[in-house]
Image: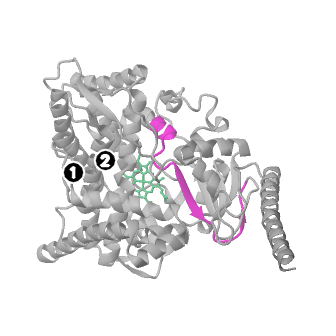
Amino acid sequence: MADWAVLWKEVAGGFRAMDLAVAMSGLFLFSCVAHRATHKGPMHWPVLGIIPTLFLHLSNVHDWITAALSHAGGTFWFHGMWLGGAHGVVTADPANVEYILRTRFANFPKGKYYRERFVDLLGDGIFNADDGVWREQRHTAASEMHSVRFGSYSAQSISSLVHGKLLRLLSRLAATGEAVDIQDVFLRFTFDNICMAAFGVDPGCLAVDLPEVGFARAFERATELSLFRFIVPPFVWKLMRRLGVGPERELKEAVRVVHEFAEKTVLDRRAEFVSSGDLRDRSDLLSRLVETKEEPAAVAGEKFRFSDKLIKDFCISFILAGRDTSSVALAWFFWLIHDRPDVESRILDEIHSIIRQREEKQEKPGDLVFAVEELGRMDYLQAALSEALRLYPSVPIDFKEAVEDDVLPDGSPVRSGARVIYSIYSMARAEALWGKDCREYRPERWISKETGRFAGENQFKYPVFNAGPRLCVGKKFAYLQMKMVAAAVLLRYKVRVVEGQVVEPKLTTTLYMRNGLLVTFKPRERNLSDVGP
Ligand code: HEM
């Protein structure tokens, strides 16, 4: 009798396990079929949602999203794990992008999700703020950056870095024939440059011996480690933070180094202001903020105070915003033109014609530092850089968070709390937007047939610099930087890409080249006696 009972239990138990397996497989199949029938987007799994599919495509995530968007007709819906996982839409439709970034701007802030992950590093800085705190910083940043004073300071600081440091380094490399990672060189250049613009301090990353600079290293690590919070569930990184273990422990240390440097710089500047009474000799953003500590608020009737903490956060955000974006764009640009002699020679023709115009005007060629006005006339170079940014946007994907339920122009419903993601990388690869040759590098698409000059694009079809009220405030600065570097380097050197390396994007919020880009520099054959560094 007892044996029968045991046997029955085993059979029943086995049945339950089998039942469960069959039921799970059925549920899985049903869920897949149901998902396929109702959605054109990527495969979703029971319980885990899109996560396994996403992990399967992590190595080429941008191309996979592009294919999924194309298959889905421009927008797809997704959800993460059941019970509390993320949910939202991914789109490459310019009408949706305009709706999110301009028409219903107030309903699509950066939101809690983004803020929570970057708050340790960025605090309330412009890049991590919404509403009033963002508006005040935006107002100040836009008016300072568009001032004549900041314009001439930035031109002078870019040119001193290019001619005083970058070209010196390249001259050493050309002499030895040594290969260098050009992405690393540009990252050093833009880091020094943005620190000069924000703080009026040169951290010295772009020295001839390519030194390791503590603040720069800590900044890089802090950014990378903050991204860890975007890929693991919140309870994991929050627990690690609480226990002070793993990447969270390293993040805390990197953030400490960055904040100590920034705090000291703010305090020193304040002391300088108190002792000398003004900071008229300085043109960086920090000095302006220290001088105008109490500002009438952009919102009428209120007084807005930039506390020292907010000044520090503002400067750190600025470094984040301006550090990598133009450097990675330059690296992709040099990679794209290395096997396009037609593009390279058109750029050189343009540069030489501008130099000839100088000589015709009987001006001394000097050491060929291009003036801002001359760079402004380099339309084809502007087109070549804009086209590189179209195919390899420095910020390949961006996202917002819906405050209230909404419906996008293409009819996609969006629930409150949803992530609203737009893929700038995929938009460049949409035939409907850029034509059959959308995947080709073709700077000519930016040159107007009527005027022969550079013609910009609609912000929402080309949101490479974002669009609407949060359009990148550093866009003008970035073009100046990129044009000055590209013109100075191409005029003097043939940049050769070392063969046999794998060039592909890295999975971060900025489109770095995963392995960098090894190049060598060969001086051009024209007489360069008057083209010194
Ligand atoms: C090729 C170069 C650049 C590209 C492609 C670029 C792109 C962008 C994008 C896509 C955003 C929006 C990011 C978001 O809200 O999630 C942004 C914002 C911003 N950018 Fe740039 N950027 C570049 C260079 C710069 C530079 C050099 C600076 C500083 C001098 C700068 C300063 C800023 C600031 C302060 C914001 C925040 C604006 C706001 O939230 O109101 N950017 N940029």
Residue 186 spot, x, y in % from top left: 30, 43
Q: CA distance from mark 1 to mark 2?
A: 9 Å
Task: Name the mark on residue 461.
Answer: none
- What residue does disc 2 label? 187
Q: Looking at the image, can residue 251 be seen? A: yes
Disc 1 C-beta below 8 A from ligand 1:
no
Are the residues flagged by discs 1 and 2 in contact, CB closer than 8 Å? Answer: yes
Amino acid on which the number 2 mark rests in the picture: Leu
Q: Ligand 1 appears in which quadrant? A: bottom left
For the residue pair 354 and 185, the one nearer the viewer reads as: 185
Q: Position of residue 409 (x, y in %)?
A: 72, 55
Name the amino acid type tagged 1.
Cys
Residue under the image location 43 percent in, 71 percent down: 119
At label 2, counting other C-alpha atoms closer than 10 Å, the crowd grade (few under 14, some 14-19, many 20 or more) is many
> Is 454 left or right of 176, judged from the image as shown?
right
Q: What is the quadrant of residue 227 in the picture?
A: bottom left
Q: Secondary structure at mark 2?
A: helix
Q: Is residue 236 above or below residue 361?
A: below
* Span shown in magenta: 386-409
Q: Nearer the viewer, residue 385 or 29?
A: 29
Residue located at (17% from left, 32% from top): 171
Look at the image and tell me whether residue 130 can be seen. no
Residue 243 or 491: which is nearer the viewer?
A: 243
Relative to 335, 206 lies left or right = left
Residue 357: name its quadrant.
Answer: top left
* Disc assigned to residue 205: 1
Q: How is the image coloured?
A: one colour
User: Residue at left 82%, top 56%?
Assistant: 30
Place of residue 275 in the rendered image (x, y in percent of width and height, measured from the top left): 12, 76
Q: Is residue 246 above or below residue 197?
A: below
